[in-house]
Image: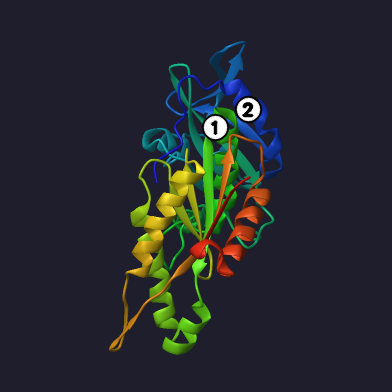
Amino acid sequence: GGGPMMQGKTNLQDFIESIEFVEKLYDFVRIVDPVAKKVSKLEGNNLENTDAICYDFWKEGRSCENCISARALLDEETHIKLEYNGEKLYMITAVPVKFKDKSVVLELLKDVTYNSVLFDVEGKSIDDINNALKTKNALIIQDSLTGVYNRRFVDERLPYEILESFIEKKPLSVIITDIDYFKKVNDAYGHLTGDEAIKVFSEKIKNCLRKDGDWVSRYGGDEFVIFLKNTDLDIAKMIIERIKNSVESTCIHYENHCVQITASFGIVTLNGKNSTLQELMEQADKNLYGAKKGEDNGMVASYF
């Protein structure tokens, strides 16, 4: 999806102060000007570059190859990457923001050195680590079966989306959805057909989303999380209705059979309020449970 480039009127100071309610997710936050290769800071109501060189943190004595913040600025979208500084392994979320007429990048850094699920650094040389990270970074936020985002992307990106919604006082909608009676599909037609159903389902969702800021992520199994930017409840329901119709009119081929699937949706809209990732996901999950019980034709929506 498109990036969360903020409007010029956004006060970056407010943004940084408000990050407190998600700061548990990050070890530290910095503002980077990837063009000047400097760390920026707010001086009064102006954003000034300091003498600190942004890439010094990584202790390689040179500018970063394939700089994540430069890419975030260029693409106008958030990028996530693993980086090693010789001592610790960090997951960086680089978010492009605008302050007055200046474009900079907010870097949210999280120490994941001891998260061996991501990567084990024990006993490896720096070259080995950096080579392995190149491969890892290509896959870190992508689901291998469907090609859409994965759960890690939700956990890293959604707190930022909630934060931006709160600062900008604009709504956002989050949807949890899954295929109805998916186990029966697997049992009747086998796991390959089940995988095909998941791929088709993700494709149908992706094709119904708008390009500017919406995204979909496979959360696990046949469950997906859909994010709709600047989207109120009524618009969210319209978009989900479109996805629902698209999914239900699709045929998944199995031998001579046409396998048809349906899906249920739990929608929650946050209207410029302060919330956490967990609270929002719990509400969407509760709504999905209601939809599964046959309420409102497979779709339950609410404000948070």
Element class at badge 2:
helix
Specify the farthest residue to the left: 256
Instruction: Give x and y (percent) for residue 81.
Output: 51, 47
Instruction: Give x and y (percent) for residue 34.
Output: 46, 29
Specify the farthest residue to the front: 296
From this viewpoint, is residue 119 visible? no
Q: How is the image coloured?
A: rainbow
Instruction: Give x and y (percent) for residue 125.
Output: 58, 56
Res. 16 mark: 2
Q: Amino acid at mark 2?
A: Ile
**Along the viewing direction, whichever of 115 and 151 lies nearer the viewer:** 151
Residue under circle 1?
106
Vertical position of residue 286 compared to residue 274: above or below:
below
Q: Residue at x 44, y 38 (%)?
A: 67
**Along the viewing direction, whichever of 101 and 228 lies nearer the viewer:** 228
Q: Residue at x 37, y 77 (%)?
A: 260
Element class at badge 1:
strand
Q: Residue at x 66, y 52 (%)?
A: 113
Q: Which quadrant of the figure has residue 256?
A: bottom left
**Along the viewing direction, whichever of 210 and 190 lies nearer the viewer:** 210
Instruction: Give x and y (percent) for residue 272.
Output: 59, 34
Left/right of residue 16 with respect to residue 10 in the rendered view:
right
Left/right of residue 23 with respect to residue 98 in the rendered view:
right
Vertical position of residue 163 compared to residue 189: above or below:
above
Q: Which quadrant of the figure has residue 73?
A: top left
For the residues bearing labels 2 and 1, Cβ distance under 8 angstroms: yes
